Image: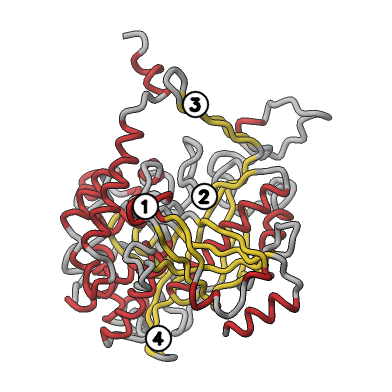
Amino acid sequence: MSVENVLKIIEDNNIEWIDFRFVDLQGRAHHISLPSSEVDAETFVNGVAFDGSSITGFRGIEESDMVMMPDPEAVFIDSFTAHPTLNIMCNIHTPDGERYERDPRGIAAKAEEFLQKSGVGTTAFFAPESEFFIFDDVRYESGMNSSSFFVDSEEAAWNTNRKEEGGNLGFKIGVKGGYVPVAPVDTQQDIRSEMCRLLAEAGLRVERHHHEVATAGQAEINFRFDTLKKTADNLLVYKYIVHNTARQYGKVATFMPKPIFGDNGSGMHVHQSIFNGDTPLFYEKGGYANLSEMALHYIGGILHHAPALIALTNPSTNSFKRLVPGYEAPVNLVYSKGNRSAAVRIPVAAVTPKGCRIEFRTPDSTANPYLAFSAMLMAGLDGIKRKIDPQELGYGPMDKNIYEMSDEDKFKIRSVPGTLDEALDALEADFEFLTEGEVFTKSFIDNYINMKRNEAKAVAVRVHPHEYSLYFDC
């Protein structure tokens, strides 16, 4: 979309405010709003200034001036503001006009440029399946003398005996019993449909929605694949609309991977493929799951670099509460067709040559999508460049339920890191594939690791409520 078209949208829709947004290293959006009377074509040339020192992981106070450069290709009208508002996603530049090396959106752009220069293909397509919970109540605290959390849902298995106003109406969802039931068991059809309506208004092509496996209101909405950076943009729009629609319904939505104990967590399975123009490069009829040799090498790169990759695709301490065996968590670093116990699954149902793709099931939505998608692409391209054969390295194919295998056979399968610190250790030891073409810089990776180590330490040194159950009577 041209700048002229954006200005026409502002005029035609009587837009009062222009909301300029950027994304931080954590994947959270930030914004500054300007009245439409202050926005013209020059704004897209000069940008909007902001203080980078107030954003975690960006710049020090001595070099805090930064500039948001609006992207006319990434706009949508806000559905939640009382005053008509147009949201515009921005790239981050330094005051001298240079692209800021820590801008996640800038890294995504460099990853797409690297693919095109590599000669492998022209476009990488991504499609995340980002799961979330919708709760009726959430409370938490973390202090010197107390630490707790509490979440509740009218659907939850623990509420079968709760007394409600007018009586308990039953139809609660059992543990692991939430996959696609109809109403009245599924109480959230309308809220998900409203989310989908607003997503469509914002320009996303919604493919389907449904209740997910866990009790207590787990949900999933799928939207159409797109190019790497555009899909990351869409995921931020998706989370914004999910959060705010839940708020309008008097509920709260969270993409936290493991908000409750004892049931499935929320993942972000990421489908990906490479095209050369209109030609799909991952398809070859007759190969394993109709995959081309290039696709297998791409899988090899993903699985070979997975321990380091997970520092970017599963970047929270809570991520590793989900990555445990027994809850459909993809902890096994193998590939398989149609097998959801493998880290990399190749979908085989109703797949056309253009729909042929691989699915990396390990990531979750605490990931910054610009960083995670870029890192996955770089790992896959390294696999293609080095012709990494996943079968030769013992990464499969594994066409059986790994959870039901003997302990001896499971022991032979490489697994994901067990903690965030372990994943960060792996990234420190294996980062060169990310710095190819200066897509990621070494200084960015060092800064990122330091930021995440601080998070891990903050959790590790705090007293956990369950420790009272284990040790108080010692």
Q: Secondary structure at mark 2?
A: loop
The amino acid pointed to by label 1 is: Asn
Vertical arrangement, residue 275 with respect to residue 36, above or below: below
In the rendered structure, the answer to whether residue 252 lies left or right of residue 249 reads: left
Colour scheme of the rendered structure: secondary structure
**Residue type indicated by callout 3:** Ser
Measure how far apart labels 2 and 4 are at the Cα level: 32 Å
Q: Position of residue 256 (x, y in %)?
A: 48, 46
Does 13 appear above or below 155? below
Instruction: Please name the residue that numbered disc 4 is placed on.
Output: 280
Looking at this view, is 245 or 125 the one in front?
245
Neighbour class for label 1 at 10 Å: few (<14), some, many (≥20)?
many
Place residue 88 in its image quadrant.
bottom right
- Which residue sits at x=21%, y=47%? 411
Label 3: which secondary element: strand
Task: Look at the picture and state if 474 lies above or below 69.
Answer: above
**What separation in Å lies between label 1 and label 2 (alpha carbons)?**
12 Å
Tag 1 residue: 314
Q: Nearer the viewer, mark 2 or mark 4?
A: 2
**Residue 228, labelled with which disc?**
none
Q: Which residue is mark 3?
A: 148
* Residue 285 in sight from this viewpoint: no
Is 410 placed left or right of 197 in the picture?
Answer: left
